[in-house]
Amino acid sequence: MNQVEITSKRFWLNSKDFLRGLFVAILTGGGYAAQVAFDTGEVHIKKIAFAGLAGGIGYLVKNFFQPAQVKQTLSPEELSAMRTTTNSAAK
C-alpha cells in the first residue's frame, strides 16, 4: 500500500512556513542585536527589527519558490521487498 502525500506545494505557503519564518526572524534579530552589542555596546531597536524582518521575509521567499515536497510511505511488505532486492543486487 504505497501512499504519497504532498506536504508542501510550490508557490504556496502554509502555517508551518509562517511559524518558522517568525522563528527565523527572531533568531536573526537576536543574532544581529548580540553582534552589535558586542561590537559597539549599543542597542538599536530599529535596526534589529529591520534585520529580523529581512530574515523572516527571506525565509518565506525561499519557501515560496522551493519545489513541492512529497512524502512517500511504504507498507512493511513493500519495504522488505525493496530491502531484499537491494541486498541481492549488492552481492
Image (cartoon, grey):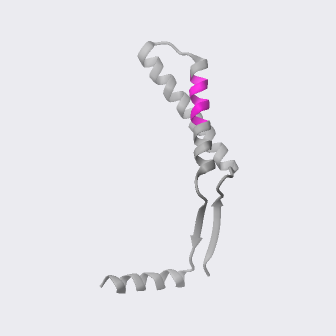
Q: Give the tally of numbered discs.
A: 0
The residue that appears at 61% across and 18% down in the rendered structure is 46
- The residue at the point 58 percent across, 52 percent down is 66
Determine the residue positioned at 65% across, 43% down.
19
Quarter of the image holding residue 61? Answer: top right
Q: Position of residue 84 (x, y in %)?
A: 41, 85
Q: Quadrant of the N terminus?
A: bottom right
Does the stretch in magenta take in 49?
A: yes
The x and y percentages for residue 31 are 49, 29
Give the side of residue 28 with respect to residue 83, left or right: right
In the displayed structure, 68 sits above or below 90; it is: above
Closer to the camera in the image, 11 or 42 = 11
**In magenta segment, residue 51:** yes
Quarter of the image containing the C terminus? bottom left
Expressed as whole percent of the image width and height from the top left, the position of residue 82 reads 46, 82
Q: Main secondary structure of the magenta part?
A: helix
**Extent of the magenta region:** 48-56
Q: Locate residue 55, reporting x and y percent.
A: 56, 34
